[in-house]
Amino acid sequence: MNSNKWIGLIALAASFTLTSCSGVGDTCKVNCGGGSGNASLNVTLAAEPLVPPPGTSILSFAVVINSVSLTPSSGGSDVSIPLNTSTFGVDLMRLTSDSAYLGQYINSVPAGTYNQLSVNMSAVVTYCVATSGTPGCNTGSIAQISKSFATPATSNFSLSLAANQQAGLRVVVNFANALTVNSTTQAVTGVSLTANNVITTVTLPPSASTLSTGQLDYVEDVTGVVTAESASSVTLQTATRGSITSTINGSTIGSPNCVIGNQVCSPTVGQVASIDATLNSDGTSTMLEFDPLTTTSEDLIEGIVTSSNTSTTQFQLVANDYIPASSGSIISGINLGDTVNVTLSAGVLPYVIDSKGLPVVTTSFSGSTSATDILPGQTVLLHITSFTARSGNTPASATVDALALRFSRVPGYVSAAPSPYFSLQSLPPFFGQTGTNQVQFGTGSPSTYLDGYSSTGAISVGDNVSIRALYFGLNSTPSFTAAKVRKN
């Protein structure tokens, strides 16, 4: 899908403040005191995957967070950071390359020094066993292990906030410290959310990135229902992460076509869309790209494909995001990390690639209607026409009439520096990789976002990275087009 400058919606950007209690763009309603003794703090969430090669295939690491707080060094009561929604849910696999907007205080954090951050969360980890060199999970090997809410995870650090300072903090969940993996059986045998260094913190902005002055972090691939739109901003309501309002400027990129149905559409209330944005130091969000997915509110599930398919009509995925229709939704029983057995309807539309303007590789996927052209490791977006929720050990099932290739999150080691592509190896086992895979960049508009690097030329052999990328298959050259590269 080609991306063009979003001519119809470019105007003077309005200033929208990220809410401290009910979603980006609303007026603060509680804990909103200002004054010379207070600072502002914006918080994002990210994750660091298992060190390559990971020893197992993590398909989903779904968490629900219900509180985040700061502990003053001098003692006294903790300062609670209002979340973007009361129970914040996200698949951390998506955040191995991306960042999610978690919450903030605007002009309400007392100036001073803080020495601990606490996060209370639960987790469900979905993994599988794979045979070396064979793409896909072994039949019947997908399993889950969970951890309920308990003692909050803590990160010891030092954060000094001055009066009227605008600060940013990224909370990072470390898979290696949270998970116990038997590399022989590829099973995840334990989840501890309170072990040492399960969470760490990074001061924003990163020391190296392609962010501009005044920008704290990228907030990417935020998918939800458009609840408000104008020539200067768009508000999206997600299923599990609250809402975000992002302003439009002359650099905002958009597409003239909706992905599902590949038909001409304009931004409108009620449609489903995905945006990339920046979180700015003053508490605003600026939209980098608007990607319309549907013309109206529809039931959508996105997930990573787990199986190599001999059937032309059936395949399997693990859900890592979903968007229920605003009314009459039939997917109310879906959960992040659920396995879904998918059946293509007789009239399924030809597949499309949601490139968001990035370069694509010619493969059998585009225009196909056969499940044999859908590969393990690819992330696809499904338009749901019927759905049966998971029951016990019986996976969920869905019938779909449209399907689009979207962005997989893939960790690995850099085995060759950019020239102009770079090579990635040591992928999770279910990719079936035995060699290296080339990764290309977007060099035009849009370009590939970088976190940990100021330019693609800084990517070096031996670097541990995570990419958000279109995945075309091991036999394609290049195998990936990266929308984002993060140095771990």
Image: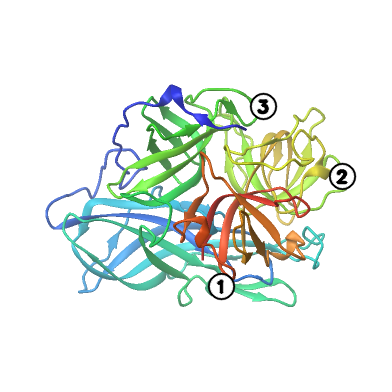
Q: Amino acid at mark 2?
A: Ser
Residue under label 1: 176
Instruction: Tell me the SS state at disc 1.
Output: helix
Q: Amino acid at mark 3?
A: Gly
**On screen, residue 184 above or below 8:** below
Q: Residue furthest left?
A: 36
Q: Residue furthest right?
A: 310
Nearer mark to the viewer, of 2 and 3 = 3
Instruction: Tell me the SS state at disc 3.
Output: loop
**On screen, residue 21 above or below 61:** above
- From the top left corner, tell me how far across and down residue 415 is, in percent: 64, 67
Measure the alpha-carbon separation of dots 3 and 1. 40 Å
Quarter where residue 284 is shown: top left
Residue under label 3: 261
Quarter where residue 252 is shown: top left
- From the top left corner, tell me how far across and down residue 27 is, in percent: 27, 38
Residue under label 2: 311
Whichever of labels 1 and 2 marks the residue nearer the N terminus, that label is: 1
Mark 2 neighbour density, 10 Å: few (under 14) some (14–19) many (20 or more): few
Whichever of labels 3 and 1 marks the residue nearer the N terminus, that label is: 1
Measure the alpha-carbon separation of dots 2 and 3. 24 Å
Q: Amino acid at mark 1?
A: Ala
Q: Quadrant of the N terminus?
A: top right
